Image (spheres, helix red, strand yellow):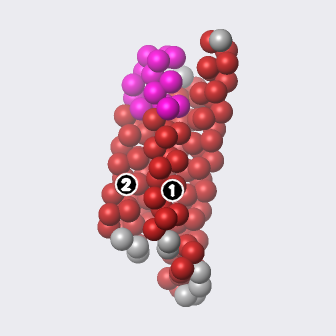
Amino acid sequence: MRTAIIAIRSRLDRAGIILSGLCAVHCVLGVVLVGFLGLGGEVLLSPEIHRVGLGLALVVGLVSLGFGVARHGRIAPLLIGGLGLALMGGAILVGHGFPEAVLTIMGVSLVAFAHIRNLHGAC
């Protein structure tokens, strides 16, 4: 049972890293394609995409980072990931544009870092 929980946590951490990367790519592409080329605004800037992405990040982040605290007793990855998720939430509140991109990329970077540290059991 214990190895199954560790495997699930590991998969969730890897999913969190992948989601963080996809979010950063989406953010940069949104700025470039919409801001500079005027393409894809209806899809890339859709509030639903951002809400769903943040919801997935919250679920994956809190579950896997919470499992990490239970597994290795270190709360730092959860705190770092929580700060990243808060920045991502703040990005939704500021509206589209450069400030949103900066907050999002900072947030997903912290979340990815937290997942990486959680996988290694350190921080």
Classify 118 as above or below 43. Answer: above
Mark 1 or 2, nearer chain start: 1
Residue 122 rendering spot, x and y as whole percentages: 50, 24
User: Residue at (57%, 75%) from the top-left corner?
Assistant: 43
Whole-number angstrom distance, CA of label 1 to CA of label 2:
12 Å
Query: Where, by quadrant of the figure, is residue 106 drawn?
Result: bottom left
Q: Given the current orientation, which residue lies at the most extreme bottom position?
A: 38
Q: Is residue 105 visible?
A: no
- The amino acid type, in three-letter code, at marker 2 is Gly
Describe residue 112's horizontal placement relative to residue 76 as left or right: right
User: What residue is shown with label 2?
Assistant: 89
Magenta span includes 111: no
The magenta region covers 63-78
Check disc 1 and report its element: helix, strand or loop. Answer: helix
Q: Nearer the viewer, residue 113 or 6?
A: 6
Residue neighbourhood size for the residue with mark 2, other residues' Cα within 10 Å, grouped as few (<14), some (14–19), many (≥20): many
- Circle 1/circle 2 CB separation < 8 Å: no
Q: Quadrant of residue 101?
A: bottom left
Compared to 38, does 20 lie above or below?
above
Residue 118 spot, x, y in % from top left? 53, 29
Name which residue type carries label 1.
Answer: Val
Place of residue 61 in the rendered image (x, y in percent of width and height, measured from the top left): 49, 38
| In this view, 83 is above or below 78 | below
- The residue identified by callout 1 is 52
